[in-house]
Image: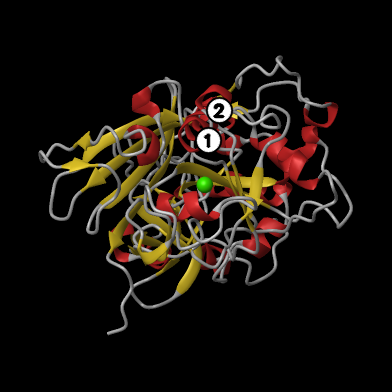
Amino acid sequence: MTLTANDPSRKSWLNVPENSDFPIQNIPFGVFITKDDVITIGTRIGNYAIDLGALQQLNYFEGIELTDDMFMQDTLNDFISDGKKTWRLVRNRIADIFDINNPKLRDNEKQKEIVIFDIKDVEMQLPVLIGDYTDFYSSREHATNVGKMFRDPDNALLPNWLHIPVGYHGRSSTIVPSGIPVHRPNGQTLPPGETQPVFGPSKRVDFELEMAFITTDANIMGEPIPVNETEDHIFGMVLFNDWSARDIQKWEYVPLGPFLAKNFASSMSPWIVTLDAMEPFRTAGPEQNDPKPLEYLQQTGEHAFDIKLQVGLAPENGEETIICNSNFKYMYWSMSQQLAHHTVNGCRVNSGDLMGSGTISGPTPDSFGSMLELTWGGQNPLKLNSGEERKFIEDGDTVIMRGYCQNDEVRIGFGEVSSKLLPPFSKK
Ligand code: CA
């Protein structure tokens, strides 16, 4: 099916500001609550949120097989379950409805009032009910940096790393949308030079610059997804801040890996940008010749995506400093390889599952995707524009991640995931 929604020459009758992440070629999917307390599935063009439930009731999706209440739900899971053909039909239709040359809704003031909201007047929700959350560890630069700091500088990459898209099962219950503040976790740590652990607030709260993809029902139990079919089961992507407590992590992670250092919070951007919208931004990933991956992980064609990523840090009431510029294309293992590996043993993947990329670090120190790496374990504090210094994230700091793809014709962006760190939770 042609992705008519991606036509770079198309213009919308809705105003799209210059450099907007959300031109008519994007058409992401999300869930929002309107001022009247109605929850609906929607999309976004420019700074307008569009109620797809209302559009469906007004019969704008006629001819596409959809259950009657498909968009009047509080999650996208059922829509995602309908599969790629339906996602494409719906995205193409939305592009058509908002095309500058289509008068049907454009010239119907009464209907526009029901369908279109100023983005400032809606509250974004988590777009999917996340059943399972898996986090990978797929940036070679990040794994190398962490290996140097936590283990052995001379053997930073463990022997399995270049053969396996390493990952672990996280928890979905503490994944929150952009804007929801996060509490500094309490936990057990081993202070430097001590032999006995102590309990208290983490002193090394960090962000992890990640992206995550959201799957559809991909397989039945026992059935692996071949690497060249995986992209049919990936609905789209979001920005993902996988908050981490480095001191808790260091003490707890041997031998079973991350646990309480990771599951106190992860924050995601609220609009899921479809893999279809990112089609023009495919690019080659890093070479995988030394060693070559095993056959079930070998793929042809381009499966990395050129997504520019940025992290800003804003102290309480202070101006933001950009502390990192990275790119999703640096990932050693592609999303396809991650999903093929995840299911090769027969593990079942469901609609709304979320797979984190792992921290995305680039080759240069300004592209490192965590404070742990940017300050090299706290040894080299970052200078903020305000004159303050940071080794890790302090109470009151807001971490903002942004991402977008851009070529000569179109910019497809993710908006942002922004969240503030609060002091440890205390019951009022
Ligand atoms: Ca992570």
Identify the residue at image location x=59%, y=31%. 279
The residue to which callout 2 is attached is 156
| Kind of residue at disc 2 | Ala
Left or right: 298 in relation to 246:
right
Q: Quadrant of the N terminus?
A: top right
Q: Position of residue 231 (x, y in %)?
A: 71, 38
The residue to which callout 1 is attached is 151
Left or right: 34 in relation to 96:
left
Q: Nearer the viewer, residue 205 or 74?
A: 205
Q: Residue furthest bottom?
A: 428
| Residue 297 visible somewhere in the drawing | yes
Q: Position of residue 400 (x, y in %)?
A: 32, 47
Q: Nearer the viewer, residue 230 or 145?
A: 145
Rendered view: 252 above or below 92: below
| Kind of residue at disc 1 | Arg
Rendered view: 389 above or below 179: above
Assess whether mark 1 and mark 2 are in contact (beta carbons under 8 angstroms).
yes
